[in-house]
Amino acid sequence: MEMPERKAMARAIVDANRYMTLGTADADGLPWASPVWYAPASLREFFWVSKPDARHSRNIAVRPEVGIVIFDSTVPSGTGKGVYMAARAEQVTAPGEVERGMAVFSARSVAQGGEEWAPGDVGPSARLRLYRALASEQFVLSQQDERLPLSLD
């Protein structure tokens, strides 16, 4: 499968799904997986909102390296497709980046029949915070169940 086909497959998976599984670990390396509703800024950059005291948020604060998979769990066995990623996650705090991230998040929410979001919905005086993951490695699965890398350009 050539790179344009891989990227098209990844784009279709990212666009068609609403939740990604976020794999984090605490300071001692104890793993934790959490489904989070996401908004992609690109095939490489993903935003979500979470409570800062959620286990995955606390884990990201001490160990920002994460694993992510986006897949459709409703398809029959042996027919699934997914996008797998190694990424670095962080809470977004810079005002300009919060505005940009919340614009992406809000647009995806509205497009999927949800509510509009604003920068004031996250941050020190709100119960939620904005988070971002930026992929450092990405793969899709081939029909032969092989992991095929995606370029990150």
Image (cartoon, grey):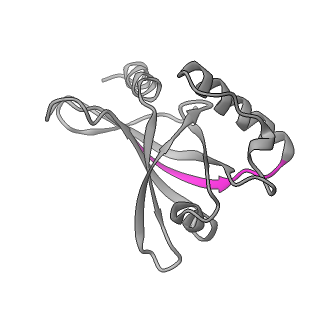
Q: Decide if residue 7 is on the left or right side of residue 50.
A: left
Q: Decide if residue 102 is on the left or right side of residue 153.
A: right
**The N terminus - image quarter:** top left
Report how many numbered discs are placed on residues in the image. 0
Dominant secondary structure, magenta = strand
Q: Which residue is drawn at 53% across and 77% down?
A: 27
Quadrant of residue 90 in the image? bottom right
Between 91 and 44, which is closer to the camera in this rendering? 91
Q: Which residue is drawn at 64% across and 28% down?
A: 115
**The C terminus - image quarter:** top right
For residue 142, above or below residue 27: above
Q: Residue at x 44, y 42 (%)?
A: 20
Residue 64 in percent (x, y) is at 59, 62
For residue 27, above or below residue 51: below
Residue 15 in percent (x, y) is at 47, 24
Q: Give the range drawn in magenta.
A: 83-94
- Magenta segment: does it hold 4? no
For residue 23, above or below residue 35: below
For residue 30, above or below residue 138: below
Quadrant of residue 125 in the image? bottom right
Q: Which residue is drawn at 77% across and 35% down?
A: 118
Between 35 and 146, which is closer to the camera in this rendering? 35
